[in-house]
Image: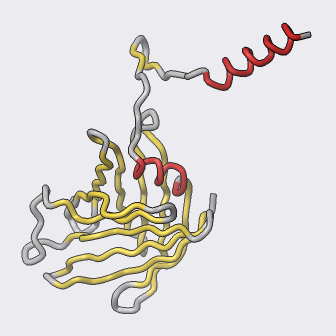
Amino acid sequence: MNKLILLSILTFSFFTFAVETTKIGDVDLGETEHSEAFLFIKNNMLGKWKGKLTQDSGNVINASYHFKLVSNGNTIREELIEDGVEMFTTYSDKDGELVIKHYCALGTEPMFKVAKLSSNSIAFKSDPQPGYHKDHHNFVRSIAWEMVGSNKMIMKNSIFIDGKIENNKASIKRTY
């Protein structure tokens, strides 16, 4: 009887801790470690979200966000649509830090770094690397996501438009 129990434990352990690797042809893609910020987005935000975004002016528009894991689990692609205008953002790790690139309808491609991470929120600040300046470019300055339970989020962002800052806020719910 003890051998049966030991065999069961070993079998269970093997299947519990077996690591699957992905291949493209003969190339083993291996495993990658991810930053806490990447894992926060992966564990909390994947899926489709819809709601309303209130602009700085008070105007309210439809907004939807779709976070999807791509590139063998190494990148998260966010497709966002605000008032019918589609944009996207990518989240991936480089040297242990989350790198965020936003492809904006304003015609700029700002990059962000993690400014704050907690158990229920993540905030990004503009990375100066792309060289955008508020007096010469329209671009997103910051983005913050706050989880309100598992199926609701609040997004806040600040944008430079013609040298002036505008603050927006979206309240969205998970649709899947």
- 65, 15: nearer the viewer: 15
Q: Locate residue 25: give its quadrant.
A: top left
What x and y, as percent, mark residue 16?
67, 25
Q: Locate residue 15: give its quadrant.
A: top right
Compared with 86, 165 (above or below) is below
Q: Quadrant of the C terminus?
A: bottom right
Rendered residue at 42%/75% (across/down): 83
Rendered residue at 13%/56% (across/down): 129
Q: Quadrant of the N terminus?
A: top right
- 50, 125: nearer the viewer: 125
What x and y, as percent, mark residue 165?
22, 83
Rendered residue at 74%/21% (across/down): 12
Rendered residue at 34%/74% (across/down): 157
What x and y, as percent, mark residue 91?
36, 50
Colour scheme: secondary structure
Q: How many marks?
A: 0
Furthest-bottom residue in this view: 58
Furthest-front residue in this view: 2
- 119, 170: nearer the viewer: 119
Q: Locate residue 34: give its quadrant.
A: top left
- Horizontally, is 173 left or right of 169 in the view? right
Furthest-right residue in this view: 1
Compared with 127, 69 (above or below) is above
- Horizontally, is 137 left or right of 84 in the view? left
What x and y, as percent, mark residue 63?
47, 72
Compared with 17, 121 (above or below) is below
